[in-house]
Amino acid sequence: MNPALHPPATETAQSPSRSGKNRRLVLILLAIVVGSLLFVSVQPGLYRAFCEWTGLYDIDRAQEISASAIPGRPVTLQFDANSHDGALLFRPQTPILPAKTGDIVHVVYRVENTRDHTVIGQAVPSYGPQYAGNYVKKLDCFCFKQQTFAPREVREMPVVFFLDTRLPEEVNTVTLSYTFFEVPVESRK
């Protein structure tokens, strides 16, 4: 018997095993593709649920709350801006603004990088009185993420929010203050 004409029995036995491994690999890859497609299809719903839960980007509720049965009342809004290390000149374009609870407010802050190199910063809000922050519902804000400023760049950045109509009656003035902190190089993402 010539061995070249008849392959050893072990090679033919491996062939079905290799075919089974290939099928298993194809099934695993197919499951990954189907799982990825399912994840992508449910992701907008998960994102919306997360935003509703946290109150971020709550634009739909803004209209609902501003049209609530509680009438709006006049409130004075004060805006303040600070830079922790002086790299950024930072100020509100409108320091005081009369408004009503329930009304959507648009305010612009001006930021200038005073340095000859790029600065990355993060704005941190604070409120006066402090508990008034529970009634400030931000729809858009530069404070949601880190900001990168080119050397000597000047930028205008909006804040869009409303004051919940359930703001306690004793609060007639709300101060919204931001402090920009430069992000250390080692923590930049």
Image (cartoon, rainbow, N blue to C red):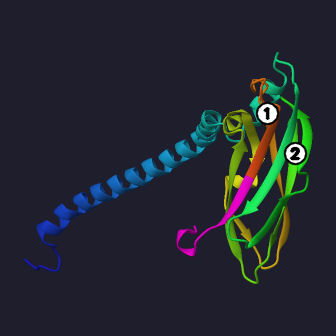
Q: Is residue 134 above or below residue 35?
A: above
| Structural crowding at the residue carrying mark 2, measured as other residues with C-alpha within 10 Å and reported as few (<14), some (14–19) or many (≥20) | few
Residue type (three-letter) at the residue carrying disc 1: Leu
Label 1: which residue?
163
Region rendered in magenta:
178-189
Q: Residue at x 49, y 51 (%)?
A: 33
Task: Choose top left, top right, bottom left or bottom right for residue 1.
Answer: bottom left
Q: In this view, does 14 lie to the left or right of 35?
A: left
Q: Which residue lies furthest to the top in this view?
A: 69
Q: Which of 94/118 is in front? A: 94
Q: Which of 142/30 is in front? A: 142
Q: Position of residue 165 (x, y in %)?
A: 79, 25
Residue depth check, mark 2 versus mark 1: number of the one nearer the observer:
1
The label shown at residue 106 is 2
Q: In which quarter of the image is the C terminus?
A: bottom right
Residue type (three-letter) at the residue carrying disc 2: His
Q: Position of residue 118 (x, y in %)?
A: 71, 78
Q: Position of residue 177 (x, y in %)?
A: 75, 50
Q: Label 2 vs label 1: CA separation?
A: 12 Å
